[in-house]
Amino acid sequence: MLRVHQGKNNATQIIQICCALFALLIFHILGKFMTNKHTHLEMIQGIVNRLSHNSFLLKGWSVILISAMFALAAKDAQILFMYLAYFPAIAFWCLDGYFLHQEKLFRALYDQVRILDDEKIDFSMNTSNVTDKVGSWLCVVFSKTLVAFHGVILVSIIFVTFISILIHKGG
């Protein structure tokens, strides 16, 4: 009687081991497809993170450089530095627009890859097929967020330049 009971345990253990091996095999097969998709999405997300970090640094450099121009203009009472402040303000605005436009393109690519079938993952970073989902570079440059930040800087430069011209004419 004891031997029959041990036979049932062995058969149950064998069935459990087979089920566990089958589950591992299914998990491994599905995991390969999900790993490719997951890896591709991580690659795209890494690019988006770098672009947004670059945009953040660019905004900081914009404020620092323009503040330095203001300080030089005030120190030496030379209005030339006020006029020179326009160049980095406009250049950084355009460059920030470029980074934001690229970021939007890669976010659109992320959304496209996210819904792709697992076997269609090709690790492509080509954003040309999602350009119609994102506005043009010029639209991004004049988006609310960039106009709010860089527009305030540009208006500040205009205001300070105007005040400096009035002081120079009056003095």
Image (cartoon, rainbow, N blue to C red):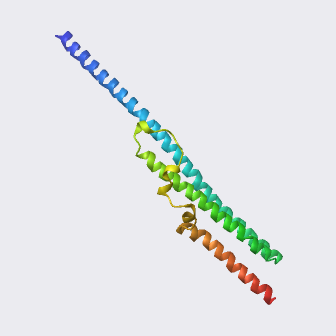
Marker count (numbered): 0
Left or right: where 4 falls relative to 67: left
Residue at the outermost right position: 76
Residue 158 % position (x, y): 68, 78
Residue 25 % position (x, y): 37, 26
Left or right: where 132 falls relative to 157: left
Residue at the outermost left position: 1
Looking at the picture, does residue 88 appear above or below residue 166? above
Q: Nearer the viewer, residue 1 or 29?
A: 29
Looking at the picture, does residue 42 appear above or below residue 93? above
- The N terminus lies in which quarter of the figure? top left
Q: Nearer the viewer, residue 19 or 31?
A: 31
Q: Residue at x 18, y 11 (%)?
A: 4
Q: Nearer the viewer, residue 47 or 20?
A: 47
Residue 122 % position (x, y): 49, 38
Quadrant of the rendered image containing residue 119? top left
Residue 2 % position (x, y): 19, 11
Left or right: where 77 falls relative to 135: right
